[in-house]
Amino acid sequence: MEIVNPNAAILSNFEVMAALKDMKNSKKKYGLRNLATITYETVQYLEDTACKEQTSAGIVEFLLAMKQFNLTKNECLMMVNDPPTSPLHIQLMIEDSDERLTEEQVSRILEYAAKLRTPTVVGATPATTTAMETGHMAN
């Protein structure tokens, strides 16, 4: 995977990890002396986060489910990168969540986040585009 325009879209940790792994596995040399070190250390860090267990299908499913809550792209990205585990976690991620979301909606978001943390699809390949890029998200 080659990133043509780095400002075209925002990437999730899952997509960054996939791009770096592809870059590491490719034979193409990028001309930067420290790129291999930076790539290695970044991949090592990302493998200790929630994105290691995520799948592209799981992320798309999660983002489609989040449409009903009228969240911003950045709020959804934060939840993909660090799936919330408690109502407090949601309050920290979603601006004015106590005014924008009911308790029932918060519990549903937590259910969707739990599914995102525990993937159901085994052997899925990393996404090269996000649901955010394809317009599946509300602004």
Image (spheres, rainbow, N blue to C red):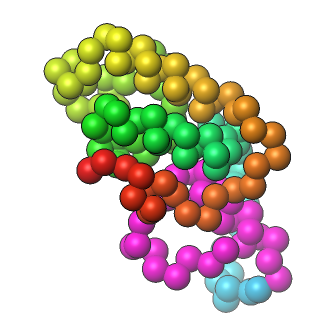
Task: Identify which residue is drawn at 31% across, 11% down.
Answer: 103
Q: Position of residue 116 (x, y in %)?
A: 60, 32
Q: Left or right? Give the position of 44 relative to 123.
A: left
Q: Position of residue 77 (x, y in %)?
A: 43, 45
Looking at the image, which residue is at 46% across and 74% down?
A: 6
Write down the quadrant of residue 71 in the picture.
Answer: top left
Residue 84 among magenta residues = no
Tell me which segment is drawn in magenta: 1-27
Q: Position of residue 124 (x, y in %)?
A: 76, 49
Query: Relative to 3, does residue 139 appear above or below in the rendering?
Result: above
- Quick one: 94 or 66, which is closer to the camera? 66
Asked which quadrant contains residue 38, the reply is bottom right
Q: Nearer the viewer, residue 43 or 123?
A: 123
Q: Is residue 68 above or below residue 104?
A: below
Quadrant where the N terminus sits is bottom right
How many numbered dots are placed on residues in this image? 0
At 32% from the left edge and 31% from the top edge, which residue is drawn? Answer: 69
Residue 38 appears in the picture as rendered: no
Q: Position of residue 40 (x, y in %)?
A: 73, 61
Using the image, determine if residue 8 lies above or below residue 129.
Answer: below
Left or right of 87: which side holds 17? right
Q: Does residue 78 appear left or right of residue 50 in this picture? A: left
Q: Is residue 94 something that shows in the picture? A: yes
Q: Residue at x 53, y 27 (%)?
A: 113
